[in-house]
Image (cartoon, rainbow, N blue to C red):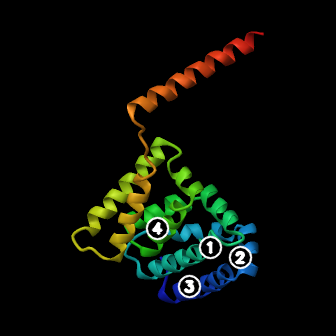
Amino acid sequence: MLSMREATRACRALALFQVMADNPETRKDSIKAKIPHYFYPFLKFCGDDKPLEYVRITTLGVLGALTKFDDTYGSHALHLFLESEVVPLCLKCMDACELILATLTFMKILTQERGLTYCCATPTRFFAIVQVLRRVVEKLSPKPCLLFVDVAGATSQYYGCLYFPPIEERKRIAKKAASSSKGKGIKGKK
């Protein structure tokens, strides 16, 4: 457990990293050095401990500063986030702590094609994300706020990735796949 004094010191140090993440010249080095990995432990604990909550919010601010994916090094930041624990940690914060910064970070990842692909890559991951989004929407629906709008936007973005073509198109795709696999089998025998 952190004291308020320790949390204040940690937040000041994190604020320096946020300034580095905001600066285009130092952002590249922060990403290359994988500095955000050192902050993930602060996101793992959700609870009523105010000092830790301040550190968690400041940590999410640092990650949020790195989510400028349209920037020169944005693709590197996205890659760093997708290869690490950022998505599960943001979901945990959204589910347990209802933090706006976690939602915004998750939404920025989700709006990138690679981020959406990552989130939909496995059925387990897809349905875990759906469950978190559902719980957050249920928590927020009695008292709609800006966070509710953000989560609803993330949910519709996420559900928008589902595409079920008409039956005729599915049959055509299956037929094409079957004929191409037969063709490969014949070529393999020669």
The quadrant the C terminus occupies is top right
Q: Residue furthest top?
A: 189
Q: In terms of secondary structure, where does tag 4 sit?
A: loop
**Left or right of 125 in this view: 140:** left
Disc 2 and disc 4 in contact, CB within 8 angstroms: no
Q: Which residue is mark 2?
A: 27
Read off the residue under disc 4: 45
Which image quadrant is residue 38 in? bottom right
Residue behind mark 1:
66
* Earlier-in-chain disc, 2 versus 3: 3
Q: Which mark is residue 149?
A: none
Query: The residue under label 3 is which amino acid type?
Result: Cys
- Mark 1 and mark 2: span between their CA atoms? 7 Å
Q: Residue at x 74, y 79 (%)?
A: 26
Q: Are marks 1 and 2 in contact (CB under 8 Å)?
A: yes
Mark 1, other Cα within 10 Å: few <14 / some 14–19 / many ≥20: many
Whole-angstrom CA distance, mark 4 to mark 1, is 22 Å
Type of amino acid at the residue the image marks with label 4: Phe
Q: Earlier in the sequence, mark 1 or mark 3?
A: 3
Which residue is labeled 3 in the image? 11
Query: Counting residues from the N terminus, which is met first, the one under dot 1 or under dot 2?
Result: 2
* Residue 47 or residue 96, whichever sits in front: 96
Q: Mark 1 against mark 3, which lies toward the viewer?
A: 1
SS of the residue at dot 1?
loop
Which residue ends up furthest to the left in the rendered image? 142
- C-alpha span from label 2 to label 3: 19 Å
Whether residue 45 is visible to the viewer of this picture, yes or no, is yes
**Residue at 49% across / 27% down in the picture?**
172
